[in-house]
Amino acid sequence: MNYTLEVRNLINNKNLKYIIYTMGCSLNENDSEKISGMLEEMGFSKTDELEDADFVIFNTCCVRENAEERLFGKIGEIKKLKETKDLIIAIGGCMMQEKEMLDKIKKSYKYVDIVFGTHTMQDLPEDVYKVLTKKEKVTDVIDIDGEIIEGLPIRRNDKYRAQVTIMYGCNNFCTYCIVPYVRGRERSRDPEDILKEIKDLANNGYKEVMLLGQNVNSYAKDGFKYCKEKPKSDIDSFAKLLRAVNDIDGIEKIRFISPHPKDFSQDVIEAIRDCKKVSKLVHLPLQAGNSKVLKEMNRNYTKEQYLELVQKMKDMIPNVAFSTDIIVGFPGETDEEFEDTLDVVRKVGYDQIFMFIYSKRNGTVAAKREDQVPEEIKHKRFDKLKELFDSSVDEINKKYIGTIQEILVEGYSKNNKDMYTGRTDSNKVVVFKPNNKIKEGDIVNIKILKDHKWYLEGEIY
Ligand code: SAH
Ligand code: SF4
Ligand code: F3S
């Protein structure tokens, strides 16, 4: 049965609208774009206003406790709305792959119509069909390594910048992290499918692609064993994939998240250096600066190895810049060990740091430890790290003044409607006055004139 078509016939002419709340990372966002694509094929149209919605979908995240709290905050609000109108509520995503959470939703939130996991998103049309015809509650969650589903429709959030998932899942089992448990094993997509997707994007006017995966530089290391057929392409590494994407006409900028320092081989560094379109801002998750903590996190590199890698990239790639993720307050981390994190931050000079307070995740190895760091100390360390980074931002931004930056015009700035906005190669927001020769989607040269804390200001050059 073609459930998409069946639902389309059922809701025909009713003008039903959906709203989707995306609560997680870029992979989660990319999934939401596919959920939107499926819903639109079923005949629903998108709204950003909850009051107008007939179908509410939550795409959840469970990487930290506050991501989960956001769901419970919002869901109460939706319950009130459901009392006043016909409303379908669906909850999907990573959090639904956690058994306790699934049980909690089923037990205490009985008004939720559909629950789906990360491995069953593609069944949404069938789930919706069941709710509409049989008025029954649907739970569609399975715990498997995962499979690769190609060909889902997609409704992208942006017109010029697109996200492309190149691999699913994670095999690393960092001891603090829940992702491998809720996303399954590493599964690399067939390179031909990826390249076809990106060529189609280029043909549709997209200029920038962000390649996504939990560990992109281990792309292809699974031997493509989850692909339906053995790939015909000779692309068998992340470096080769980068070079192939770089050859696609129309695509002007390539970014990728997240690579893992342990898999940052020479060929990947060379590909970044050689490929003109590949951003020279490398996201290199540090997590912690102390080698003992890193070992306990199961990160597979030491402080020294991380710094050596940074130095190697600085030597090999002109104008390379770095961003990173850092966790403070991993179980057992002492003040002294935390100093190593600050030391690495000083030595590398990051353009951007995503900072997180360690959050205990049930089912992970680190959650079982008894030497959890008290909340107060974790917060103190967070503030200290933030202070250190904030004090370096001015210095980093000043370096841009007088430089010419190539920028993709993304459109008018949300905060200043007279100005256009875009990003430097290193992902810094730039605003500038438009003229009538340039339009959204163009690549322009901008001379940077002024720095602000969170953006740069310039003029067309
Ligand atoms: N696969 C990517 C990102 C995974 S999740 C990587 O390895 O870099 C994004 C970030 O969330 C991680 O880099 C980590 O810094 C943070 N994170 C993951 N689990 C966490 C936890 N239990 N508490 C706090 N931060 C966490
Ligand atoms: Fe989590 Fe580590 Fe995998 Fe990243 S690499 S998703 S931090 S287990
Ligand atoms: Fe969250 Fe799942 Fe991403 S847990 S960070 S949405 S992979």
Image (tube, grey):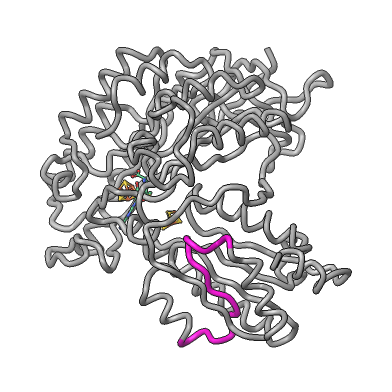
Q: Is residue 199 left or right of residue 95?
A: right
Q: Inspect the magenta stretch and tell me whether residue 386 lies in it.
A: no
Question: Would residue 398 be visible to someone looking at this image?
Answer: yes
Name which quarter of the figure residue 268 lies in. Answer: top left
Question: How many numbered badges does the structure rendering display?
Answer: 0
Residue at image point 68% right, 25% down: 432
Residue at image point 27% right, 44% down: 287
Q: Is residue 335 left or right of residue 162?
A: left
Name which quarter of the figure residue 199 lies in. Answer: top right
The one nearer the camera, 78 or 96, is 96
The one nearer the camera, 445 or 43, is 43
Q: Where residue 63 sits in the image (x, y, percent)?
A: 38, 58
Q: Inspect the magenta stretch and tell me whether residue 108 lies in it.
A: yes
Residue at image point 12% right, 67% down: 370
Q: Is residue 331 left or right of residue 417?
A: left
Quarter of the picture holding the N terminus:
bottom right
- Position of residue 115 relative to residue 432, above or below, is below
Per the rendered image, the range of residues in magenta is 107-122
Name which quarter of the figure residue 269 lies in. Answer: top left
- Position of residue 111 relative to residue 88, above or below, is below
